[in-house]
Amino acid sequence: MEHLPVELVGNILSRLGGARDVVIASATCRKWREACRKHLHTLSFNSNDWHVYHDLLTNRLEILITQTIFQTTGLQGLSILMDDVDDFSASTVIAWLMYTRETLHRLIYNVRTTPNVNILEICGRQKLETLELSHNSITGVEPNFQRFPCLKSLSLSYVSISALDLNLLLTACPKIETLGLVNPEIAISDAQVTVELSSPTLKSVYVEAISLDKFILEVDSIESLHLKDCALELFELIGKGTLKHFKIDDVSVIQLYIGETVDNLESIDVSNFTIIWPKFYQMISKSSKLRKLRLWDVVFDDEDEIVDLENIAVCFSHLSHLALSYDLRDGVVNYGLQGSSHLENVITLELGWTVINDLFSLWVEGLLKLCPNLKKLVIHGVVSEAKSHEECQMLANFTSSIVQLMRTYMHVDVQFDYE
């Protein structure tokens, strides 16, 4: 250990994560103290890592964090996550940011202060590449002054910001590639709750727990879009056909438009979603490069709608991963097995149920026949704690049926995933 370069010791200490562990390790010897002071590049304060953070008085906690930060030089990554802790003094937090801002590349910030600290004003025009803000307020964005020339990833969680400022903030980040919005408090000036965001460089967008009338996203380079737990009247994606991954989970939307952006789609993941299948199929039918299709816990707007696997086999000839959940309505399965076309390239098949019955094993058998080159089968199921004798017998019958069925498909790896 004595022969390790002090720079390498600094790298080791930076990988410890928690500031408490770094401080303890730096007390090992003089060399390690030097490494902590001159070559430490990452430091993290997380109130969930150490119970003492909650026990200390706020001013004592501020002193502890201040002493630790001010003993370093050249920090590149700083994470301060203070959940369930009283408000900090704004002047103290500003001092932390002013001391580190010229070298910071990554800032993860969840600190409540009195008054609010303007992160954009303090950290703008610096080297930040990643910024994650939580429980903060952003007002009066000035793209020319509060500019982030190097920022590639921006995440806003429980942040209060106006629709205009949000779009201006994207404008202030000319190299931004990743955007995450989690439960933002969007301030709207008129009666209609509308957000329009535009960026020529964004590649990945994640939106969770947002409620709007209209959400219009104009992004020329987008590759990944994930909407989760949202309530929208209209969502429109305007792009240039670069979208590769589209995921929608537990979203209520009346009008969904992803326009002419579907030609290069490689994966579609839809779950906990009410769907008008003919319209949705028409929207994605041009995705000839599709490799993964997941329709899970999908509710069909018309109970008599049938997802024609024949059309899926013909339109998505490159499909290699298919995931379907089973829903029986009046003796009719929403996924039809009719037709002569096979899913030739499907090598992974995931099938699941919410309420099992005797028809499930027959449905599994039918799908296995459609996938002649299958290599892996995953069965997902829901098993309740309290079961009647009939339910136990049905599960036992299903197990016996699958065991017997798989003797015909010895080359297929079978896995079960119950919850």
Image (tube, rainbow, N blue to C red):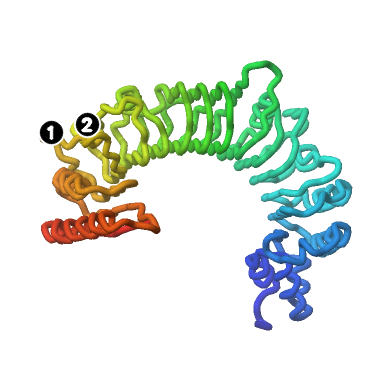
* Residue 365 placement (x, y as % from top left): 16, 48
In the rendered view of the protein, which quadrant contains the C terminus? bottom left
Q: In this rendering, is residue 158 above or below 12?
A: above
The residue that mark 2 highlights is 308
Residue at the location (63% across, 33% down)? 174
Q: Quadrant of residue 124?
A: top right
* Residue 312 placement (x, y as % from top left): 24, 33
Q: In this rendering, is residue 198 above or below 2?
A: above
- Residue 151 seen by the camera: no
Q: Quadrant of residue 330?
A: top left
The residue that mark 1 highlights is 339
Query: How far apart are labels 2 and 1 at the CA level?
Result: 9 Å
For the residue marked with disc 2, what is the amino acid? Answer: Asp
* Residue 298 placement (x, y as % from top left): 36, 36
Side (left or right) of 132 relative to 334:
right
In the rendered view of the protein, which quadrant contains the N terminus? bottom right
Residue at the location (53% across, 33% down)? 230
Q: Residue furthest bottom?
A: 2
Observer-nearest of 166 and 280: 280
For the residue marked with disc 1, what is the amino acid? Answer: Gly
Asked if marks 2 and 1 touch (Cβ < 8 Å), the reply is yes
